[in-house]
Amino acid sequence: MAITVRIPTPLQRLTNSQSEVPCEGKTVAELLGDLEKRYPGIKERICDADGKLRRFVNVFVNEEDIRFLQGDQTAVKDGDDVSIIPAIAGGA
């Protein structure tokens, strides 16, 4: 069993139009590395030049925001659901 990563619509062109993809890793950082191996170019869209998540990208592990856990060192395991969600700003 792998970890399911939910891909936001703007990035699905990099995952062959898949909204969910299986990946492997023990932490969110490893998971993102595996995601990049499977779908080259996706990591640069969600991480900066230093490999850190961009400010406007939110990542949730089983519906918990990793900013309130251990960031990209948050542990993941088979069967977990990870969601990559771009922040939305605006309004009146």
Image (cartoon, grey):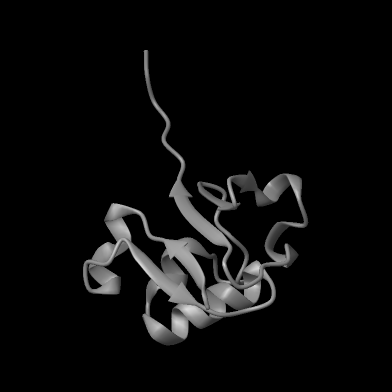
Q: Position of residue 15 (x, y in %)?
A: 29, 72
| Number of dots carrying numbers | 0
Q: Can you name the residue that lies furthest to the bottom here?
A: 37
- Residue depicted at x 56% and y 80%: 24
Q: Position of residue 21 (x, y in %)?
A: 39, 71
- Residue depicted at x 46% and y 72%: 43
> Nearest the camera: 24 or 47?
24
- Residue depicted at x 41% and y 36%: 88
Q: Position of residue 27 (x, y in %)?
A: 69, 71
As drawn, 33 above or below 5: below
As drawn, 12 above or below 67: below
As drawn, 60 above or below 32: above
Q: Can you name the residue that lies furthest to the top here?
A: 92
> Nearest the camera: 41 or 67?
67
Which quadrant of the structure image shows residue 17? bottom left
- Residue depicted at x 55% and y 56%: 54
Horizontal side, residue 29 vs residue 88: left or right: right
As drawn, 43 above or below 7: below
Horizontal side, residue 11 vs residue 66: left or right: left
Q: Position of residue 42 (x, y in %)?
A: 39, 72
> Nearest the camera: 29 or 23?
23
Q: Quadrant of the C terminus?
A: top left
Which quadrant of the structure image shows residue 6? bottom left
